[in-house]
Amino acid sequence: MTMAQPVDEPAVTPVCVIGPEFIIPNPLEVIVETNSKGSLLVTDINHKVMLKAKECNTIFHHQLLLLHADDRPIAMVRDKLMSGHKQWKVYLGDSIAKSDMIFSTQAAHVVGSRTNVHVFLANKKRKKDPWDFLIKGSWSKRNCTIYMGDVSNIIAQGNKNGSGGRRRLQDVSSINDFIQC
């Protein structure tokens, strides 16, 4: 009589999105603060600045510049105003050059306050190809789950933990390391 051997779960193939400094191997609590100008400040629970986001809109685009704690640009998040496509494009640093695009998003559908967003890496040849990541979440509940490929592969989650207002505590956990560079 032979005993069944334990089956290892399949390994996840890492994918480079922005950079290895954004890998979090353990769950993390962060504080997200907003100000009246729409800027964000993300700190750890000891109030050490981890990330900043600054609005820098133009007449035709809603833009958000993500910054390191020392104000070095990480990425430009850009949405075309007066467009019904619900599409965002994210570029490396403070660039908006097509050659610096990292990924784009397309809202799949919104049901109540639940949103599904498809994420396509910049190397995607056709929008008809399947998405690389799927973000499912609730804006009102301030939570989301990020999947790589289909919905069976959760790679990260974020959940509101604490009171609302301009300052809130957010739990962030990476289920798998999904960054390779």
Image (tube, rainbow, N blue to C red):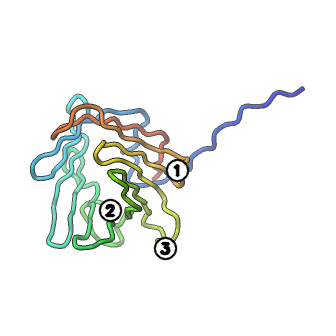
Along the line of sight, the residue nearer the viewer: 147 or 22:
147
Helix, strand or loop at mark 2: strand
Q: What number is the disc on residue 90?
A: 2
Mark 2 or 3: in front is: 3
Local SS, label 3 = loop
Rendered view: 114 above or below 129: above
Q: Nearer the viewer, residue 12 or 86?
A: 86
Residue in view at x 72 percent, y 31 percent? 6
The numbered mark, 2 or 3, whose residue comes first in the sequence reads 2
Residue at 37% x, 48% y: name it.
137
Asked which quadrant contains residue 118, the reply is bottom left
Residues at discs 2 and 1 in contact (Cβ within 8 Å): no
Structural crowding at the residue carrying mark 2, measured as other residues with C-alpha within 10 Å and reported as few (<14), some (14–19) or many (≥20): many
- Residue at the (38%, 51%) spot, across then down: 19
Q: Nearer the viewer, residue 44 or 157?
A: 157
- Quarter of the image containing the N terminus? top right
Q: Residues within 10 Å of mark 3 (few under 14, many from 20)?
A: few
| Residue named by callout 3 | 126
Q: Which mark is residue 151?
A: 1
Q: How far across and how far down the image is residue 60, in percent?
A: 18, 73
Position of residue 43 in the picture relative to residue 1 (left or right):
left
Amino acid type, callout 1: Val
Identity of the amino acid at label 3? Arg
Disc 1 residue crowd, few under 14, some 14–19, many 20+, Cα 10 Å: some
Cα separation, mark 2 vs mark 1, equals 23 Å
